[in-house]
Amino acid sequence: MYSPAIPSVRYRLLIHDSRPLHQHHSIKMKYFFLALCYFIASTIITWFFIEQGRILYFSQTQMLLSCAIAGTKWGIQILAALIFLKTEKWIFIQKIGFTCFIGSCILLPYCFFECIRTIEKSFLISLIAAVLVMIFMYFKVITSLKLSKNWFWGWIYCLTIAIILQMVVVFKIV
């Protein structure tokens, strides 16, 4: 007997999306593919940024470590989404991938200015601008998907740890 208090899976899916059930898998794959493209492009851009600032690093190992630290905070968020999110995991991963991509694109002006050597301190300016934009965009992702603010604060925590690691381990500033 049908109970309206416990709607079927088909009914729940149709409330949120009018597409047939067989199309939901292709939608997940679309989000997965977009996220993959965003994160790959972000990694390439971030490495290009690090490579342009190579005079700030003491070795190739530090450059790799810097890139790994930058990527780990995103990896933690992806892993958390795969474990803890049920229905919104792929759109969340795609949206944070886009956030990461935009943040990486903000680093590109530094690469241009470093190539023509016109602006000093543009490395730090680019990093600060990228971080501020990503913080804003990440918050918008959380609110648009109606996720707990704990996701935002968890990412801020990861970002803070990443910044501290960059300062202490990579650049030995502190």
Image (tube, grey):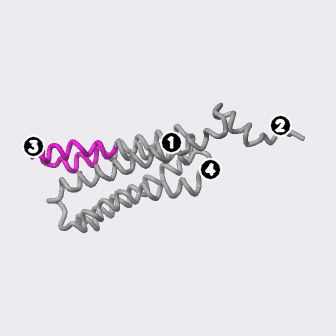
Q: Residues within 10 Å of mark 3 (few under 14, many from 20)?
A: few
Q: Are marks 2 and 4 in contact (CB under 8 Å)?
A: no
Camera-near label (4 vs 1) is 1
Residue 61 rendering spot, x and y as whole percentages: 25, 68
Three-letter code for the amino acid on which mark 4 is drawn: Lys
Secondary-structure class at tag 1 = helix
Camera-near label (3 vs 4) is 4
Of pointers 3 and 4, the one earlier in the residue sequence: 4
Q: Is residue 92 above or below residue 169?
A: above
Task: Write down the residue under mark 2.
Answer: 4
Of pointers 2 and 4, the one earlier in the residue sequence: 2
Camera-near label (2 vs 1) is 1
* Residue at the extreme front of the image, as rendered: 22
Left or right: 109, with 75 as reference point: left
Task: Write down the residue under mark 3.
Answer: 118
Which residues make up the magenta segment? Answer: 103-129
- Nearer to us in this view, 41 or 145: 41
Of pointers 4 and 1, the one earlier in the residue sequence: 1
Write the residue at 86% across / 39% down: 2
Spatial separation of the CA atoms under disc 4 and disc 1: 17 Å
Left or right: 166, with 12 as reference point: left
* Residue at the extreme right of the image, as rendered: 1
Spatial separation of the CA atoms under disc 2 and disc 4: 22 Å
Secondary-structure class at tag 3 = loop
Which labelled disc corresponds to residue 30?
1
Task: Write down the residue under mark 4.
Answer: 86
Spatial separation of the CA atoms under disc 3 and disc 4: 48 Å
